[in-house]
Amino acid sequence: MIKQIIVSVCLLVSLGSIAQEGTASPYSFYGIGEVRFKGTHEFRSMGGIAIEQDSIHMNLQNPASYGNLKLSTFSLGATYATTTLKADSKSENARRTTLDYLAVGLPMGKFGVGFGLIPFSSVGYKIRPTESLTENNQSFNGKGGLNKAFLGVGYKITPQLSVGADVQYDFGKIETNNFEYISGIAIGTRELNNADLSGVNFNLGMMYQRKIDKKLSLFSSLTYSIESSLTSKNTRNIATAVYNENFELGIVDVLEEVNTVEKLKLPSKISAAAGIGEARKWLVGVGYTFQQAGELSNKYNALDNVTYKQNSKFSIGGYYIPNYKSFTSYPKRITYRGGFRYEQTGLVINSQPINDLAVTMGFGLPLSGTFSNVNIGVEFGQRGTTKANLIQENYANVSVGFSLNEQWFVRRKFN
């Protein structure tokens, strides 16, 4: 059954995930946009902690985890996000529904393979006058982002130690559209920028666990992303334009079109996490991620008041299952998750660092008679600041994910 679901869903949502507007943040103008969480909702609900060698859930954060899969797994997740954009004098609300990941995991003895599609970064903002155009008005629009198609392999060296690696093909398109109107001049100026992005990068991973005593185990995870580059093929089109009575932009005359090619640097990144717990009962872990400063400015978004520094993230989270074997009480078989994360994004505007913090929680709902489950998560967070004429974003995200499991490639004894 899962095979049919995979084929149908892949055909329907793969192209849609590429074209979606995954954010409403004005901060997505900078660099390659707002970087999305790379992982399933099971681990996102725990602040991003993914350290247990799980046999039925895909861990997209560490390719070493694929060697621990026991069943063929199909994972799909989406999020409904609401954001309040707050400035000193006013606030606005925005909503988005996005596809977060589409992945398949296949066990092959001590080996495991994972492949899929992940939106890596998103650009999506619309800033324009709410009333009739007056003196020196400007409007700004942006959409697009970067996607990753990945293929990874994990290998279980011993019952305690697994290693893995994956290769990711990066592709996407970012479009920004700026329009300026000056009072007394009938026609304004529009600048349209298109950046076609492509590249390849590699990740290495390792997971280790060992028994401390009869019940307790120590869990750990380590990943390293190798520094890579993105090729950005840029087109800048400058034209005269005017708004009509429906507030739609119409082109009057193209003044200039310029094509360039730039190299953007995706810096290396290292993530480490460790925790303690009783398998299939409870777990608590902490994690830390460090990433060097990148060179992500393109010609259309390179500004004097913007710099990119080192990125770091701290996470803490875990889960609790009252009794996963219970036949009489469904609530006892539910996985209860929670966590917290704090991230210094590395983006600095007007000398103000743009930081992001959030509280997460969620539930894993088992589907009776199967190893499959539905995962629901909630995230409340804050990004940015109102200092230095900037924007503070208060967001609430509701996520739903599916982890569907079956046994494939079983040799039949009877025809």
Image (cartoon, rainbow, N blue to C red):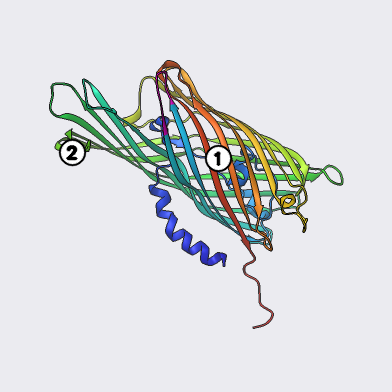
Give the alpha-carbon distance from disc 1 to disc 2, as whole Å: 44 Å
Question: Residue 249 or 307: which is nearer the viewer?
Answer: 249
Binning the other alpha carbons within 10 Å of mark 2 as few (below 14), some (14 to 19) or many (20 upward) gives few
Query: Viewed as shown, does residue 204 lie left or right of 383?
Result: right
Among the 4 quarters of the image, the one containing residue 86: top left
Query: Which percent across, then down, holds residue 155?
Result: 66, 54
Provide the residue designation for mark 1. 225
Q: Is residue 302 magenta?
A: no
In the image as oriented, which residue stretches furthest toward the right?
214
First to last magenta residue range: 86-93
Residue 28 visible in this rendered orientation of the protein: yes
Earlier sequence position, callout 1 versus callout 2: 1
Among the 4 quarters of the image, the one containing residue 31: top left
Q: Is residue 23 above or below residue 365?
A: above
Among the 4 quarters of the image, the one containing residue 216: top right
Query: In the image, which disc is placed on residue 250?
Result: 2
Q: Is residue 87 magenta?
A: yes
Binning the other alpha carbons within 10 Å of mark 1 as few (below 14), some (14 to 19) or many (20 upward) gives some
Residue 23 visible in this rendered orientation of the protein: no
